[in-house]
Image (tube, helix red, strand yellow):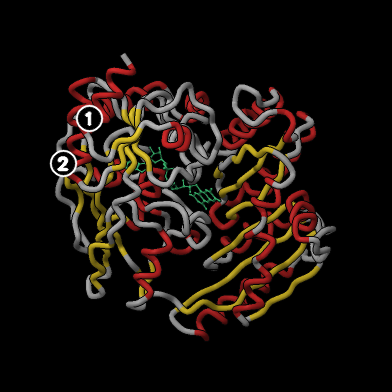
């Protein structure tokens, strides 16, 4: 059956491949979730018509399809599980940037950083900046509602999407939203599709909001005796009505990992660090905001350093930028992504420390603290196996407890990475039976045969 279908895909679609290399590369995403089987085949689509043709055929044949961008996802959302992988990363045209309306129209495979660079030529920016901006696609960002560091001030992907072109499960092309600053005609299908993780349609085009590119102000790095004191300082920044363009927290375990990784000792013994940056319409506005943030962060800090020089600012941000690679250098990493109300950040970090102590599993935490979005990284030794099946039970136990903690604090299982396959078993913690039933009814209305990314997200 698989062989016959595979042969048909190869014969029908010019961009189809089923060689070992193509199948292996599309089997999982950056989370490393093993999945149950290689893809049926991989179709690298070059146009909207090709995407439509693939989905029309798959719908008729009831063949499951996994949409795929760059495969940098951290939730197992693009894991193939034997499905036909529809890779749209080759559709990478920036169709146009309209500097008057401050919008861009793009294909789904455009890399996030490339769009931001194109916007910069007009004094504009594309605000959502996942740390993967140089390697992830706009289509994947839309499908996961990606966030990033400057989202604390400038909003996440959903805030930037004005309209979409989406191919539905049966091959129809749906246009949602608008290109104007305002618009309220019909249900907001654009918002529904953003974050739907490839389960409702394949994004083949997007109209995106750009914003005036601000002047980047200074940067401040403060260290604290412990992570709770640091978390409380971050919560006070929000409570003081301040708007940093970046407000990140790094715990002691992560700082030690960064010190090992870089061979520097500067922050090795700090109990926690907070780094903040400001921007504004001009240099004085950004500088004034930084001054006020420094006043708030100074309270309880062991050390505090601020600088307006962009090169030095970059150095102050180094520990945060290297946090993930440094932790990954120590062993396998299950990257979690909970979000809690900002006022409960300190309780969240205390809870995560307790979970690490009780399960005996190392957990490294850094956070987009201004959003209450924490990335606790649950780590285990390299020789213990990487895949879900081989992961020590204590790692999954720790992850489950982290999700329970997030919900108990009034938060959510995922701030920006999505549910994918990794968090699906925990959905019931956050969505009650009625909420789940409505979500599944929406899925059934748009994808009645359940071919789009089955087993993911909801
Ligand atoms: C080093 C690193 C840093 C990261 N930092 C961040 C961060 O700061 N913030 C953040 O939010 N994420 C981050 N991520 C996670 C990841 O980059 C994002 O989730 C990103 O949005 C995924 O984009 P992608 O193109 O790689 O999508 P993929 O991984 O290919 O797919 C992700 C999901 O989207 C679906 N999908 C992809 N393209 C489409 C499409 N065109 N239409 C419909 N569905 C589609 C897939 O089916 C899957 O469910 C990071 C990842 C890495 C490796």
The image shows residue 444 at horizontal and vertical percentages of 25, 24
The image shows residue 325 at horizontal and vertical percentages of 66, 51
> Which residue is rendered at x = 35% and y = 48% of the image?
89
> Which residue is rendered at x = 53% and y = 41% of the image?
30
Q: Nearer the viewer, residue 24 or 235?
A: 24
Q: Is residue 423 above or below residue 277?
A: above
Q: In the rendered view, does 145 fall on the left or right side of 265?
A: left
Q: Quadrant of residue 224?
A: bottom right
Judge the density around disc 1: few (<14), some (14-19), many (≥20) Cα neighbours within 10 Å: few
Of the 4 image quadrants, the one containing the N terminus is top left
Q: Which circle's residue, 1 or 2, is located before the other in the chain?
A: 1
Q: Nearer the viewer, residue 195 or 235?
A: 195
Number of numbered discs: 2
Residue 17 in sight here: yes
Look at mark 2 in the image and give the residue it sits on. 173
Residue 419 in sight here: no
Q: Quadrant of residue 405?
A: top right
Q: Residue furthest top?
A: 1
Look at mark 1 in the image and give the residue it sits on. 11
Judge the density around disc 2: few (<14), some (14-19), many (≥20) Cα neighbours within 10 Å: some
> Which residue is rendered at x = 65% and y = 66% of the image?
317
Q: Quadrant of residue 69?
A: top left
Q: Nearer the viewer, residue 359 or 2?
A: 2
């Amino acid at each position: 059956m698989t062989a016959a279908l595979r042969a048909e895909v190869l014969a029908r679609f010019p961009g189809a491949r089923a060689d070992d290399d193509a199948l292996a590369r599309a089997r999982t995403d950056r989370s490393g979730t093993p999945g149950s089987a290689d893809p049926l085949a991989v179709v690298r689509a070059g146009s909207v018509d090709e995407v439509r043709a693939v989905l029309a055929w798959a719908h008729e044949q009831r063949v499951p399809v996994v949409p795929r961008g760059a495969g940098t996802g951290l939730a197992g959302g693009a894991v193939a599980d034997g499905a036909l992988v529809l890779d749209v990363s080759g559709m990478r045209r920036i169709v146009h940037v309209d500097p008057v309306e401050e919008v861009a129209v793009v294909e789904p495979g455009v890399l996030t950083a490339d769009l931001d660079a194109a916007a910069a030529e007009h004094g504009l920016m594309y605000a959502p900046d996942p740390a993967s901006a140089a390697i992830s696609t706009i289509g994947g960002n839309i499908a996961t509602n990606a966030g990033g560091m400057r989202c604390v001030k400038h909003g996440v992907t959903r805030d930037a999407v004005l309209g979409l072109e989406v191919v539905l499960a049966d091959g129809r092309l749906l246009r949602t939203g608008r290109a104007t600053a305002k618009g309220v005609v019909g249900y907001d299908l654009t918002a529904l599709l953003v974050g739907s993780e490839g389960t409702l349609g394949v994004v083949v085009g997007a109209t995106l909001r750009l914003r005036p590119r601000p002047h980047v102000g200074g940067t401040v790095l403060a260290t604290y005796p412990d992570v709770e004191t640091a978390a409380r300082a971050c919560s006070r920044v929000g409570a003081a009505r301040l708007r940093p363009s970046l407000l990140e927290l790094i715990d002691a375990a992560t700082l030690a990992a960064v010190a090992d990784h870089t061979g520097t000792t500067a922050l090795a013994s700090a109990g926690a660090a907070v780094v903040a940056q400001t921007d504004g319409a001009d240099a004085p506005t950004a500088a004034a905001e930084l001054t006020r943030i420094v006043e708030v962060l100074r309270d309880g800090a062991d050390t505090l350093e601020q600088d307006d020089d962009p090169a030095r600012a970059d150095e102050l941000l180094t520990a945060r930028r290297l946090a993930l690679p440094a932790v990954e250098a120590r062993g396998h990493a299950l990257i979690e992504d909970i979000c809690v109300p900002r006022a409960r950040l300190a309780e969240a970090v205390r809870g995560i420390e307790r979970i690490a102590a009780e399960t005996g599993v190392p957990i490294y935490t850094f956070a987009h603290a201004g959003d209450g979005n924490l990335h606790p990284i649950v780590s285990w030794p390299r020789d213990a196996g990487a895949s879900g099946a081989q992961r020590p039970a204590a790692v999954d136990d720790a992850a489950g407890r982290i999700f329970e903690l997030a919900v108990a604090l009034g938060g959510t299982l995922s701030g920006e990475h999505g549910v994918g396959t990794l968090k699906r078993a925990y959905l019931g913690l956050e969505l009650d039976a009625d909420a789940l039933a409505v979500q599944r009814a929406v899925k059934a209305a748009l994808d009645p045969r359940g071919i789009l990314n089955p087993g993911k997200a909801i």
